[in-house]
Image (cartoon, grey):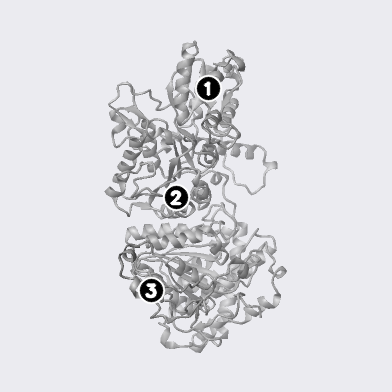
């Protein structure tokens, strides 16, 4: 029936196969006959636990990850199990502990660095880019950096401008980094395990509001060998009229939008990107060649965003297949306001996605009469 | 003569090895008073060091439970501000006097003749390499170069005091350590000329050397970013339980970076076996040390972070050797960081893109070149032992020069790295997009050779 990759994922064999339009290697449908419900938090915790158990070189570093069990409880229980040598509570210096983790990675350890949010990672961005991303190249392959940077990214609820930015497009523009953005618990488990096992530096963008959300997962997902390939998107919902790409929390919104569109006779195909760098251009293009219409959805700022890259990729490779201009849904081009009503207006909502899809299908509804 | 430490006065030298202890002990600080300073800070009111504690404050429950500072803190009803500068600057350890004689032979542990000789010959080779490569840059044969002139003793003596398993994390003014460990003149030249034999595959500017084999981490251009890296690497060594330490080098300018503070702080907390070796050469491009910090140099910052530290005369090869050897032993056996401030002078310009006569007097440069010149000083000591003479000097200088000139000539003629090397090592495995881009580039260069330099090695790619 539905097969997923369960062998140890190394990443390279899949990537070297090149772009094969139409063949999305491991896209698998939702496991409807689920074994149990797993929250994203539990998925991440179990992934960290299993990888730490399997490889003594894996260690965790970050603020509050140990005694406090993690600012969002993602690392709960790990200090007790693995001890303070492998779960390090760091002083408050993102630049400092990121640099230290990178140095440890240079010397053969496999650190997983937690940022309380990726907003704070800006203090460490020199080490993420100049030290982690570029060193394998600059050292001509002598020094590898098998490090994972993880933490909540993007908007939460009522946390204001300095706690709500989405960094997907910033990191995804840098060669040397891999950038992942899980949505479901299956994504969280599979991608984090793959990230920890990957020899390259990986930026792992979680979402605070998804931590508590439960998703049904199958027994295969719960197996300790489970991992998802990096660089492959997932078709969350198949459709034939319009392609909607999304990542992280917006996948949920896109799926809701697809339900609404379905009632109005528009069959939307929802792609969960999972991997922002490398972007699964093959899957996106294959989908657009099928539907001929595209809506990109992201929470982050519009300019130079993920949607802009997806649009260009489709224009470069599948221009002749487009029947309508590409629609781009993104957050408002303002620092995130705090007041609840303003915050809601600054972020994409389900209705925005529905309207964009209708515009792409030339069934646009005038703004004044919006649903 | 312009004083190197311009705050005030001169630093005193000491012939004995005195380290300023940081806080003792592991997690809890077991100090009962702050009087372990070697030079006591000026206070608003002077008091006796023993009797100034109001001892009845110690035993009450509140004081005992007040553990934020990790143990007993003496209370005082006299309000005292600790002075911003110590009464006396931290003394600077040196072994050789200005005539190259041991100041106090009791305080010098000794060195084998073999190592002593290699130290000198390597210092001369380093000095010669700098002269020749600098000239090469001026002639337009390489694009850029960074000399180590004046800091040869720091480079070579510290390398000599370490072992090959000790992991080196350099800034960019420490090629001498590579030289000591076996990097050849040809290796240096190949990197500077970015030819196909460059270990760095032509990826970086000149002087950005690196060697996994010699445990010398690749030079990056970012300032002080290597210091937290050094701590992380030391942590990894600690977990491995190896009989080795990490040495992170940096300059006076680098000590202003946030990374320096995080690194020292963390190293102390993590109890990492790392030596922080500061080459305080007085200048950060055109910024003199007096504009860089207002503390008594960098050594005092060690205690601020709970790191044992020492100030050494960086131009005294034997002092450097001695201090680094002791530091290494302490770092490994006690599993804790050590800070060494090597006081020296940057005789050359910051890099070939700099003309330092624009911001400092020529007399100052010349003075340092003459007085306490690391090579001259050390040579005097070797000669006083009967281990060196003028003939040997002339021969060494001549041979080094020839070898380096030849290395440049050879390096210049070697092919540049292949175009394919541009696309590897971005990731562990070459991703498909780079695979495609490389193919396209190879085809384009082959098809339009007139648009590309003639020395770009391409591979034939079938235009499928």
Give the residue pinned by disc 3: B33
Say if B110 sits above or below B192 in the image: below
> Percent from the top left, x then y, of residue B373?
59, 79
Mark 1, residues whose alpha carbon is within 10 Å: few (<14), some, or many (≥20)?
many
Element type where label 2 sits in the image: loop
Which numbered disc, 1 or 2, marks the residue that appears first in the sequence?
Answer: 2
> Percent from the top left, x then y, of residue B203?
56, 51
Which dot, 3 or 1, sits closer to the camera? 3
Which of the numbered marks, if any, corresponds to residue B462?
none
Which dot, 2 or 3, sits closer to the camera? 3
Mark 2, residues whose alpha carbon is within 10 Å: few (<14), some, or many (≥20)?
many
> Percent from the top left, x then y, of residue A105?
42, 52
How far separated are the C-alphas under marks 3 and 1?
67 Å
Q: Nearer the viewer, residue B400 or A304?
A: A304
- In the rendered image, residues at marks 3 and 1 fall on the same chain: no
Say if A177 sits above or below B181 in the image: above
How far separated are the C-alphas under marks 1 and 2?
41 Å
Q: Chain of mark 1?
A: A
Which residue: 41% across, 36% down? Answer: A13
Give the residue pinned by disc 2: A144
Say if A336 sits above or below A349 in the image: below
- In the rendered image, residues at marks 2 and 3 fall on the same chain: no
Element type where label 3 sits in the image: loop
How far separated are the C-alphas under marks 2 and 3?
46 Å
Q: Which quarter of the rendering shows the C terminus of chain A? A: top right
Q: Nearer the viewer, residue B20 or B108?
A: B20
Give the residue pinned by disc 1: A353
User: Picture quarter containing residue B247?
Assistant: bottom left
Q: Chain of mark 3?
A: B
Q: How many marks?
A: 3
User: Picture quarter containing residue B279?
Assistant: bottom right
Left or right placement of residue A329 versus residue A8 in this view: right
């Amino acid at each position: 029936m539905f097969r997923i990759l369960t062998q140890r994922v190394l990443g390279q064999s899949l990537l070297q196969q090149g772009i094969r339009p139409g063949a999305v290697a491991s896209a698998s449908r939702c496991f409807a006959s689920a074994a149990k419900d797993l929250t994203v938090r539990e998925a991440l915790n179990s992934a960290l636990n299993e990888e730490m158990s399997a490889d003594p070189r894996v260690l965790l570093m970050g603020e509050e990850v140990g005694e406090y069990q993690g600012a969002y409880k993602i690392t709960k229980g790990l200090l007790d199990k693995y001890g303070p040598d492998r779960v390090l509570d760091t002083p408050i210096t993102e630049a400092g502990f990121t640099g230290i983790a990178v140095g440890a990675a240079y010397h053969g350890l496999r650190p997983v660095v937690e940022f309380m949010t990726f907003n704070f990672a800006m203090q460490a961005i020199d080490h993420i880019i100049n030290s982690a991303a570029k060193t394998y190249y600059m050292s001509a392959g002598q020094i590898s950096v098998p490090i994972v940077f993880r933490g909540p990214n993007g908007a939460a609820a009522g946390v204001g401008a300095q706690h709500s930015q989405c960094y997907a497009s910033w990191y995804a523009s840098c060669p040397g980094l891999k950038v992942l953005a899980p949505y479901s618990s299956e994504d969280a488990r599979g991608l984090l395990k793959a990230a920890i096992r990957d020899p390259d530096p990986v930026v792992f963008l979680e979402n605070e509001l998804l931590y508590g959300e439960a998703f049904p997962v199958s027994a295969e997902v719960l197996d300790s060998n489970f991992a998802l390939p990096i660089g492959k998107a997932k078709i969350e919902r198949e459709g034939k009229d319009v392609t909607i790409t999304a990542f992280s929390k917006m996948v949920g919104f896109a799926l809701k939008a697809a339900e609404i569109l379905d009632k109005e006779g528009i069959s939307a195909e929802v792609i969960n990107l999972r991997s922002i760098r490398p972007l699964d251009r093959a899957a996106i293009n294959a989908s657009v060649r099928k539907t001929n219409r595209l809506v990109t959805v992201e929470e982050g700022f519009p300019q130079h965003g993920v949607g802009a890259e997806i649009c260009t990729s489709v224009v470069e490779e599948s221009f002749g297949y487009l029947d309508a201009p590409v629609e781009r849904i993104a957050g408002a081009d303002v620092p995130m306001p705090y007041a609840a009503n303003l915050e809601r207006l600054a972020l994409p909502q389900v209705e925005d996605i529905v309207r964009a899809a209708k515009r792409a299908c030339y069934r646009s509804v005038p703004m004044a009469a919006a649903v | 003569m312009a004083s190197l430490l311009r705050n005030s006065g001169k630093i005193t030298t000491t012939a004995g090895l005195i380290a300023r202890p940081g806080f003792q002990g592991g997690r809890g600080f077991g100090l009962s008073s702050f009087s372990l300073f070697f030079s006591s800070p000026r206070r608003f009111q002077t008091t006796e060091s023993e009797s100034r504690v109001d001892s009845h404050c110690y035993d009450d429950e509140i004081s005992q439970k007040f553990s934020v500072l990790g143990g007993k803190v003496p209370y005082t009803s006299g309000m005292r501000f600790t002075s911003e500068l110590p009464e006396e600057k931290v003394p600077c350890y040196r072994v050789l006097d200005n005539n190259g004689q041991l100041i106090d032979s009791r305080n010098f542990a000794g060195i084998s003749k073999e190592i002593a000789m290699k130290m000198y010959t390597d210092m001369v080779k380093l000095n010669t390499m700098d002269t020749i490569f600098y000239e090469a840059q001026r002639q337009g044969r390489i694009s850029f170069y960074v000399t180590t002139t004046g800091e040869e003793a720091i480079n070579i003596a510290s390398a000599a005091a370490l072992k090959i398993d000790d992991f080196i994390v350099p800034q960019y003014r420490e090629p001498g350590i590579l030289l000591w460990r076996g990097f050849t003149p040809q290796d240096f030249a190949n990197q500077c000329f970015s030819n196909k034999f460059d270990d760095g595959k032509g990826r970086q500017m000149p002087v950005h050397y690196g060697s996994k084999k010699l445990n010398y981490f690749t030079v990056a251009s970012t300032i002080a970013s290597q210091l937290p890296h050094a701590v992380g690497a030391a942590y990894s060594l600690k977990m491995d339980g190896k009989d080795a330490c990490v040495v992170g080098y940096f300059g006076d300018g680098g000590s202003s970076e946030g990374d320096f503070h995080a690194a020292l702080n963390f190293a102390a907390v993590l109890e990492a076996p790392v030596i922080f070796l500061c080459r305080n050469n007085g200048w950060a491009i055109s910024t003199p040390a007096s504009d860089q910090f207002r503390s008594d140099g960098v050594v005092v910052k060690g205690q601020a972070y709970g790191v044992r530290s020492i100030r050494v005369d960086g131009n005294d090869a034997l002092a450097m050797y001695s201090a680094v050897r002791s530091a290494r032993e302490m770092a490994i056996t006690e599993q804790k960081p050590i800070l060494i401030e090597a006081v020296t002078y940057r005789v050359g310009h910051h890099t070939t893109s700099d003309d330092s006569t624009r911001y400092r007097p020529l007399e100052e440069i010349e003075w340092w070149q003459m007085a306490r010149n690391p090579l001259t000083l050390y040579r005097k000591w070797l000669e006083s032992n009967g281990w060196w003479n003028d003939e040997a000097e002339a021969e060494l200088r001549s041979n080094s020069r020839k070898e380096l000139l030849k290395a440049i000539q050879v390096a210049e003629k070697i092919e540049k790295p292949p175009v394919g090397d541009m696309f590897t090592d971005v990731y562990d495995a070459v991703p498909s997009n780079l695979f495609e881009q490389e193919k396209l580039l190879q085809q384009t260069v082959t098809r339009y050779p007139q648009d590309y330099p003639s020395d770009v090695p391409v591979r034939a790619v079938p235009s499928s």
